[in-house]
Image: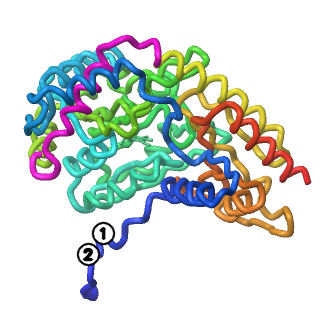
Amino acid sequence: MTEPTRISHRIASIAESATLKVDSKAKALQAQGRPVISYAAGEPDFATPAHIVEAASRAVLDPKNYRYTPAVGLPDLREAIAAKTLRDSGLSVSASQVIVTNGGKQAVYQSFATLLDPGDEVLLPTPYWTTYPEAIRLAGGVPVDVFAGSEQNYLVTVEQLEAARTERTKVLLFVSPSNPTGAVYSEEQTRAIGEWAEANGLWVITDEIYQNLTYDGVRAVSIVEAVPALADRAILVNGVAKTYAMTGWRVGWMVGPADAIKGAANLQSHLSSNVSNISQRAAIEALNGPQDAVEEMRLAFDRRRKAIVAGLNAIDGVVCPTPEGAFYVYPDVTGLLGRTWGGVTPTTSLELADLILDQAEVAAVPGEAFGPSGFLRLSYALGDEPLAEGIERLQKLFTA
Ligand SMILES: Cc1ncc(COP(=O)(O)O)c(C=O)c1O
């Protein structure tokens, strides 16, 4: 029998978000006056576009926003999300199939909680976003890592997924573009994986939060657009945070078939009820208003992406595939391990991340936060100048 503990085993076993941990360490050092350049944060450095902020400030003055509203979200926002889902994911849904959540993060958690019974397995393409395994375990499920390295551009294959499938497999997590790798599945790869999931009766939770941030003319085709027959067993997760520089507004959503949405709506009605009406009004403007600012931000990310990939690949021992989406690069740094830099010999990417923070005052998240050691995640959602300065510091450190 397990010993009683002050707090529950379930909660005590949750790991602190490693990305937030590195970011707060970097911020604490900055607060002490250290000139730390941080590539750790997963959020755009831009201000939310003015027309969205103005919609919110009008909403603040309108008393109709001062009360509880439906737990699943404002009807106008649910309509706007249904229209966006058709526009960008090629799936026709009614507003009743949408739940507005406190960020995509709540949608991720609620999706797993809605689908999983104890012991159900979830295939998790690895490297994975650090929240997925914790959300799966909290829901009683078992994450099953399916690893794809830099030599396959961090994209898993149907063969790998099939090798990991068991009779307990219930869900496939699919995310394209990916956090942490920025990798985007081609339409053919997406279709092959979707058809395999459909043929095996799996549910798919597809996290599309970076779908509007792609480069080189690439489009991240939704798995439900590639395989429409999946729609009855698919939950789409999305939100305004990344596309509209709205991380602090906390508006995300989940879209799915009626039974899953009904269950998740019941859960949310007891958990958090409606998202702030002010934020929801802002999100309506984001989705229905002009999209010019989105394109401007995307172009800036694209410029920085090219600069960071070139700068990292110029370091001997670093292999950095060119990501086609999101705002992260995920270099393979195994070539730097076991060598001595400034008197220190890192053998893991965790130690390497500590070393570059100590010796170059550069913060990056180690691969251990997302799966195996041997990688770093660098977000290029920071200004062009600090981005260039940080890369110069790394080049200097590793050529010394
Ligand atoms: C892959 C992925 N999904 C979902 C989210 C959740 O975003 P938010 O809760 O800010 O909407 C994030 C944020 O980092 C993410 O990277």
Indicate yes or no: mark 1 CB to ligand 1 under 8 Å. no
Say above or below: 151 vs 36.
Answer: above
Left or right position of 64 against 56: left
- Verify whether residue 210 appears in magenta: no
Left or right position of 139 against 51: left
Q: Residues within 10 Å of mark 1 (few under 14, many from 20)?
A: few
Residue positioned 23% across, 61% down in the render: 118
Q: Which residues are magenta?
A: 269-293
Residue positioned 23% across, 30% down in the render: 280
Image-quarter location of ligand 1: top left
Amino acid type indicated by mark 2 = Ser
Specify the quadrant that holds the N terminus.
bottom left
Q: Residues within 10 Å of mark 2 (few under 14, many from 20)?
A: few
Left or right position of 140 against 69: right
Amino acid type indicated by mark 1 = Ile
Q: Residue 29's spot in the image, x, y percent?
A: 62, 59
- Find disc 1 in the rendering and name its residue: 11
- Find disc 2 in the rendering and name its residue: 8
Say above or below: 104 vs 284.
Answer: below
Magenta region, mostly helix, strand or loop?
A: helix
Q: Specify the color scheme.
A: rainbow
Q: 202 or 286: nearer the eye?
A: 286
- Quadrant in the rendering for residue 245: top left
- Verify whether residue 273 appears in magenta: yes
Say above or below: 78 vs 320.
Answer: above
Q: 9 or 148: nearer the eye?
A: 9
Can see residue 389? yes
Residue positioned 23% across, 26% down in the render: 281
Assign a secondary structure to mark 2.
loop
Residue positioned 50% across, 34% down in the render: 44
Q: Residue 14's spot in the image, x, y percent?
A: 37, 66
